[in-house]
Image (tube, rainbow, N blue to C red):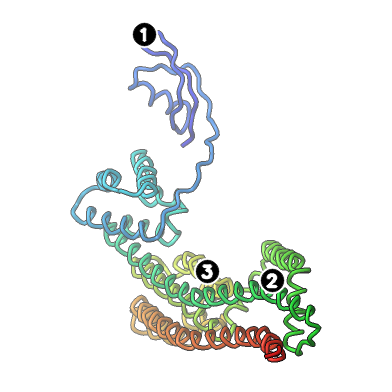
Amino acid sequence: MSLYRYRALAANGRHVRGELEAGDLAELEHRLRPLGLMLINGEPRRRARRPAVRVPRRELIHFCFHLEQLLSAGIPPFDSLAALRDASPHPRTRAMVCALLAAVERGKPLSDAAAALPGAFSPVAVGLLRAGEAAGTLPQAVRDIGAALARDDELATHARRIAIYPAIVGGILLLAVVVALTELVPELEKLARSTGQALPLQTRILVALSHAVRDWGWALLLALASAASAAAWALARSAALRLRADALQLALPLVGEILRKLALARFAALFATLYGAGINVLDTLHTTEEAVGNRALRAGLRAAGHSIEQGSTISDAFAAAGVFPPLVTRMLKLGEHTGALDRALDNVATLYRRDVSESIARLQAAAEPALTLVMGGLLLWIASAVLGPIYALTSHLPG
């Protein structure tokens, strides 16, 4: 279907210009006839690229819940979407539903309409919709999409919890140090020079740091910004470097294993959902590649897919990839033997989600006192370096 710009003749002899979607000029003429218009000429027009409709995950979860309820009640997709369009209080969700409605009204299936909105529906969601349409289980497919989104939201919450507390404490600590070096220490230096008092070593170090921050702080910020820009440029230009950076993330102490479990929990849950919906293993692997996020694990999935295409079993292919832990390969082998691969991977996802939650709780329990001790020790050193000369000065004042 292309968007045609046409000029037509109305029944009253008036010339009418407009735009209409059609496959070719013959179809355009056929679609204009019921409108009382006779085609004079028409030409395809390049459609302006519309900005992607991006809908927050929480709104998508609510949309899937209500759509599944309407479809389960036997209401056709078009009428269900129309009801949700009129009832939705969120502008972004309403824009998404309007786009879906326009596509369904033109005769497209819901999966194709969703595929045209990549900002709202992932390849996993589109694959589930296609499988549900083919099997006649569209309400179940929409329910599975909502469940997958809910799991992703839970995993994203876990990931945010790793960084929030260290970021807050680090920001407060950096602010305190900068204020001390730029405001407090210069006044202390002036006081010491006016009295001719010799400063102790730790105070001299603090004064040197203060000079460095005041005189070369702009250069340090420029160097950091340049280094970040160069790193971003290099990552954008080199796929090998991006792969190495993602592999390095998985090798980080403490958080690397948590990040691996987060990615594997997402993979196992999506694999179980897609495979349970009747999608074959190779298509399931291809769809879950992008959802994993980490490029090292994505390369492992791609390698496993190639091995399966060459006749290897699923468990052997994953073991040969070298990036998946023994738990995943054991559960895959168990699923192959029992014929319940989706159930086995769903158990893996459940186990990893529980492990991630417990690991993050332990990490936070250890990080809070550790960061507090670091912040307290640094501030204590600054306080002693500042107050030491002041105490020495006051002790030498005549009584």
Which of the labelled discs sits on residue 182, or is there none? 2
Which of the labelled discs sits on residue 293, or is there none? 3
Q: Is residue 238 visible?
A: no
Q: Which residue is mark 1?
A: 12
Q: Nearer the viewer, residue 75 or 247?
A: 247
- First in sequence, mark 1 or 2: give its number: 1
Q: Quadrant of residue 229?
A: bottom right
Q: Nearer the viewer, residue 168 or 278?
A: 168
Q: Quadrant of residue 268?
A: bottom left
Residue at left offset 50%, top offset 25%: 5
On screen, residue 147 above or below 39: below
Quarter of the image with the C terminus is bottom right
Q: Nearer the viewer, residue 312 or 250?
A: 250
On screen, residue 307 above or below 329: above
Q: Could you tell me residue 296's position as x and y percent?
A: 58, 75
Question: Along the horizontal axis of the image, is 114 left or right of 387?
Answer: left
Q: CA distance from mark 3 to mark 2?
A: 42 Å
> What amino acid type should be assigned to the residue bearing mark 3?
Gly
Q: Are marks 3 and 2 in contact (CB under 8 Å)?
A: no
Q: Outermost residue, top direction? A: 13
Helix, strand, or loop for circle 3? Answer: loop
- First in sequence, mark 3 or 2: give its number: 2
Q: Nearer the viewer, mark 3 or mark 2?
A: 2
Q: CA distance from mark 3 to mark 1?
A: 60 Å
Q: Nearer the viewer, mark 1 or mark 2?
A: 2
Q: Outermost residue, left direction? A: 73
